[in-house]
Image (cartoon, grey):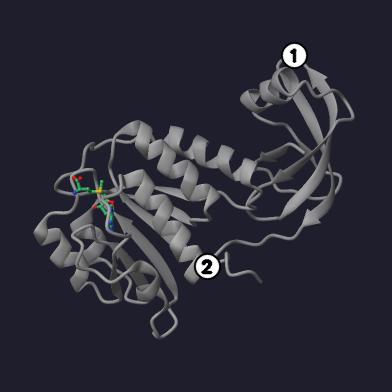
Amino acid sequence: MIRLFVGDDLKAGGQVVPSPEQAHYLIHVMRLSVGAELLLFNGRHGEWSAKVVSIGKGRCDLGVEAPVRAQSGGPDVDLIVAMVKRARLEVIVEKAAELGARRVRLVITQRANAGHANLARLNAIAIEAAEQTGRLDVPEICAAQKLDRVLAEWDAGRRLMFCDEAGDAPPALAALTAPAAPALGWAILIGPEGGFSPAERARCRAVAGAVPVSLGPRILRADTAAIAAMSVWQSALGDWRGT
Ligand code: SAM
């Protein structure tokens, strides 16, 4: 069943007019006709059944029918990733959405590969991934900040899973499952293709709530590391543990 993320409020009997791009997708790519059913979600009101009620030139109208799933969100985990090259960053955003990251926060580090990201494009990728993966919200894509600032403003209630490729950190699963006070939230930090500088590593480890981890004996590319780190976090502390 097609799922569409919309900005509109969703309530029984409501009408939604998708964007021209969404209308094109529904009519010309998915070839829906009047009466076709689909699902709508907006990140606030849960998931609703809907039907195509009219099709015009470059537009269509959707009639909102009934609630299907109540709004819920995944665990409070951010993925903080250094600016890597565009193609790899797009993979990271797509996989972060599928793996349940609540936010993707971009950071600029000393060895970052890029300083600029196309947030509109990353947001579109996050929406498409959320539609495909069945989640009821879309991860927020946060504009790039300098790593120093992120660390200086760190919220002590949030635990930092610092993926440190230097090789002297404890294995990730053991570090995450070690006895510790419950955290208000988590963040996972992944460095750039050139890794973290020694000064950055020291600063990351000094953060209150930092949990330095190793992702194994091999050096992973940033996108692989992001996927691996999200997977081990979801298995240890997140919603892969079952209900
Ligand atoms: N410095 C290395 C280099 O230039 O080949 C690689 C850095 S790696 C591509 C990018 C990021 O992925 C690292 O900064 C770290 O956050 C994470 N990472 C990769 N392999 C890791 C490992 N074995 N353990 C922990 N983190 C790892």
Q: Nearer the viewer, residue 178 or 42?
A: 178
Left or right of 172? Residue 19 is: right
- Residue that badge 2 annotates: 238
Name the residue: 73% across, 32% down. 17
| Residue 132, position as x, y percentages in the image | 63, 41
**Camera-side residue: 204 or 216?**
216
Task: Name the residue rendered at 77%, 20% in the picture.
Answer: 31
Image quadrant occupied by the N terminus:
top right
In the picture, which quadrant includes the C terminus? bottom right
Residue, disc 1? 57
Viewer-proximal residue, 103 or 112?
112
Residue pushed farthest top? Answer: 57
Question: Could you tell me how far apart the alpha carbons at marks 1 and 2 are, in whole angstroms?
Answer: 45 Å
Q: Position of residue 240 (x, y in %)?
A: 57, 64
Position in image of residue 219 (x %, y %) = 26, 50
Q: Farthest residue to the right: give it.
A: 35
Q: Is residue 229 above or below residue 119?
A: below
Residue 62 visible from this viewpoint: yes
Label 2: few (<14), some (14–19) or many (≥20) C-alpha neighbours in 10 Å: some
Three-letter residue code for mark 1: Lys
- Does 113 sit above or below residue 105? above
